[in-house]
Image (cartoon, grey):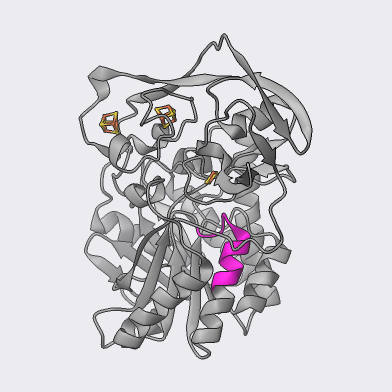
């Protein structure tokens, strides 16, 4: 189904995001192919996708078969038109998995006339020859928003590391672009929804991270996003490269956990993963949908369950081997204290000693919520502790408070 972007002028604040971070495939030609990459990039919801008509059809070849599709649509759309299964949020065994939709994760890459390109933001053209299977020796790519030493850490940074750290910085961080969620509170949406820029191979990314660590000598790397797990092959290769270059370092990922099947976790651990932080978002599906911006209830429920199951699996299967911390977000406009208490109890059933950080969910990107006060976060912290968790932390606008600071 062809679409096009509609601008709602009265909502536009001229922030420039849609021109500066979006890899709009129609930009040079002043046309719109309805790929939708600009929609999440707009913090003010001033762009909508609407159905559009196309008078002309064109001929393409997909995996050796001739097909006719409407002109001026994305290749992802063309593949869907020709009967291929295309998945967005969760892979679901689809032939094309396009989780970010903004040209950042390269998970949707296909071969177009011999060149590998992203199907979500590439316009289909008459006579194109497309293959959905990538060459075995293709080195995966991903767009990176930032590689730099970081002072904040994440929910998977052990409290002891934070407390005993004498450096200003805690970890060398790599923030990748692209996410399968659309959280209205996204704190770094200019990175998350960025599609512009040159992508990086795992080898080059590992070398850049290692270069910083040689300078700052932290011995800890944090891979985050956006959502770091979207492009599995890229992430596994990055961990392997990092491990080769840094045999003793801690390799930490920070994730929403929605894609972490058991075999994915096993592969990450085999590749060198030592620390993981999972932001659980919620216990109830309705809260999860509000927090993540996911619209499809069934998909949201599966994302949520995957994350909780991943926590359970890692705690039991990799108890001594992988450090795990979880995030419990709080804002009174998103969740209730009862749900926080129930999350605490659920976590206790998995492992009462799991490091649990109450996260201040504050206004950012599209959310119009109020910043939680220090006392509110203190109450959340207390509820988690009273639920039986033995290692609780709270993150507030005034910084982190440890297990004893209730
Ligand atoms: S990013 Fe895609 S949907 Fe947005 S204006 Fe460009 S072609 Fe149209
Ligand atoms: S991103 Fe949205 S608000 Fe910003 S300039 Fe574009 S349309 Fe306007
Ligand atoms: S879905 Fe196309 S690059 Fe991420």
In terms of depth relative to the viewer, which is nearer, 45 or 355?
A: 45
The image quadrant where one finds ligand 2 is top left
Nearer the observer, 220 or 396: 220
> Residue 236 magenta-drawn?
yes
Q: Is residue 19 above or below residue 336?
A: above
| Residue located 52% across and 36% down the image | 122
Q: Is residue 180 left or right of residue 143?
A: right
Q: Is residue 235 visible?
A: yes
Of 108 and 261, nearer the camera is 108
Residue range (magenta): 228-238
Q: Residue at x 69, y 71 (%)?
A: 266
Name the quadrant containing residue 182.
top left
Residue 286 in view, yes or no:
no
**Position of residue 112 in the picture relative to residue 186 (left or right):** right
Which quarter of the image is occupied by the C terminus?
A: bottom left
> Whole-percent x and y of residue 127?
64, 28
Which x, y percent locates residue 191? Answer: 36, 52
Quadrant in which the N terminus appears: top right
Extreme-right residue of the structure: 65
Q: Residue at x 46, y 71 (%)?
A: 204
Residue drawn at the location 33% of the way across and 52% of the way down? 188
Residue in front for this viewpoint, 53 or 389: 53
259 shown above or below 249:
above
Image location (x, y in percent) of residue 300: 59, 41
């Amino acid at each position: 189904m062809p679409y096009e972007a509609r601008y709602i002028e009265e909502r536009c604040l001229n922030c420039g995001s849609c021109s500066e971070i979006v890899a709009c495939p129609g930009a040079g030609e002043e046309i719109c192919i309805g790929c939708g990459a600009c929609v999440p990039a707009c913090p003010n919801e001033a762009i909508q996708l609407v159905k559009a008509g196309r008078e002309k059809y064109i001929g393409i070849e997909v995996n050796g078969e001739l097909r006719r599709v409407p002109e001026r649509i994305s290749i992802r759309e063309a593949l869907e038109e020709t009967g291929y299964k295309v998945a967005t949020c969760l892979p679901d065994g689809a032939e094309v998995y396009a989780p970010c939709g903004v040209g950042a994760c390269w998970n949707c890459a296909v071969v177009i006339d011999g060149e590998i390109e992203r199907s979500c933001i590439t316009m289909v053209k008459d006579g194109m020859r497309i293959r959905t299977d990538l060459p075995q020796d293709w080195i995966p790519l991903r767009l990176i928003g930032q590689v730099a030493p970081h002072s904040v850490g994440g929910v998977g940074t052990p409290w002891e590391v934070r407390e005993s750290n004498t450096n200003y910085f805690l970890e060398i961080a790599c923030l990748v672009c692209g996410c399968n969620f659309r959280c209205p509170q996204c704190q770094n949406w200019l990175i998350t929804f960025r599609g512009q820029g040159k992508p990086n191979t795992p080898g080059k990314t590992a070398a850049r991270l290692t270069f910083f660590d040689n300078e700052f000598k932290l011995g800890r790397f944090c891979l985050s996003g956006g959502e770091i797990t979207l492009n599995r092959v890229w992430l596994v290769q990055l961990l392997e490269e990092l491990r080769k270059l840094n045999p003793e370092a801690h390799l930490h990922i920070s994730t929403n956990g929605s894609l972490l099947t058991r075999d994915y976790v096993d592969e990450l651990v085999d590749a060198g993963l030592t620390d993981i932080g999972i932001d659980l978002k919620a216990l109830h599906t309705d809260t999860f949908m509000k927090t993540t911006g996911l619209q499809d209830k069934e998909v949201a429920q599966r994302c949520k369950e995957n994350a909780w199951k991943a926590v359970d699996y890692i705690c039991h299967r990799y108890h001594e081997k992988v450090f795990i911390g979880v995030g419990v977000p709080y804002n009174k406009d998103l969740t209730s204290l009862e749900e926080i208490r129930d999350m605490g109890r659920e976590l206790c059933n998995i492992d009462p000693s799991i490091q649990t950080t109450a996260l201040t969910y504050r206004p950012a990107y599209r959310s119009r919520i109020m910043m939680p006060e220090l006392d509110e976060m203190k109450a959340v912290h207390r509820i988690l502790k009273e639920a039986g968790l033995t290692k609780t932390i709270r993150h507030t606008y005034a910084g982190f408070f440890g297990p004893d600071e209730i």
